[in-house]
Image (spheres, rainbow, N blue to C red):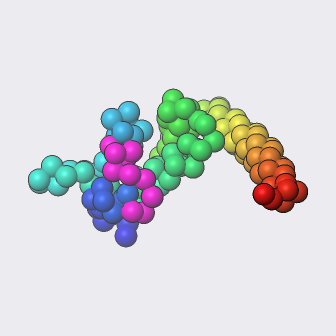
Amino acid sequence: MSGEHMQIGEVAARTELSLRTIRHYEETGLVVPSARSQGGFRLYTDADVARLMVIRRMKPLGFSLEEMRGLLDATGRLDAAEEMPSEERDELLERIRGFEQAAQQRVQDLRTQLSRAEEFAATLARRLRNSPTS
C-alpha cells in the first residue's frame, strides 16, 4: 500500500482512534496529513498511520504531547537521514533510549497498579462469599 493515500475514516479504523482524536493530533502538529484531496479531505499514508500508532502506544503510558513530539522528532530524523554526524546520531539514539527506559518504568508501574487492583477485587469477592445471606 506504499504511496497510496487513505482518508481519515480508514486511518481511524486502522489505528482504532476516533476521528476527533486524529484531528486533535493534527491540530497539535503531531501528525499532519500527507496530502489533501481536491475536495479538501485529509489524506494519509502508511507513514502517517505509523506515527499515529506510536502516539496511540505512548498515550496509555502517560507521555505528554510534548514528549510524543520529542520521540517522533528523534525517530523521524534518524529515519530520514541517510548520513549524519555520529555525534548527532548518538544524541538521537540516547534520546530514544531515554524514552525506552521511561516506557519500561511506566509499564512496571502499571503492572503494580493492576496487581493492587486485582488484590482489591479478590478481597471484595472473598468478603461477598463469606457474608451471611439474609
Name the main secondary structure of what is drawn in magenta.
helix
Taking depth in this image into account, of 104 and 93 the one nearest to the observer is 104
Taking depth in this image into account, of 57 and 96 the one nearest to the observer is 57
The answer to whether residue 25 is visible is yes
Please indicate whether residue 109 sits to the left or right of residue 1 in the image. right
Rendered residue at 36%/59% (across/down): 11
Please indicate whether residue 123 sits to the left or right of residue 36 in the image. right
Q: Which residues are magenta?
A: 13-23
Q: Residue furthest front?
A: 134
- Asked if 89 appears above or below 80 in the picture, the reply is above
- Quarter containing the C terminus: bottom right
> How far across and how far down the image is residue 128, in percent?
80, 55
86 inside magenta stretch: no
> How far across and how far down the image is residue 113, in percent?
76, 43
Rendered residue at 39%/40% (across/down): 25
> How far across and how far down the image is residue 109, in percent?
76, 40
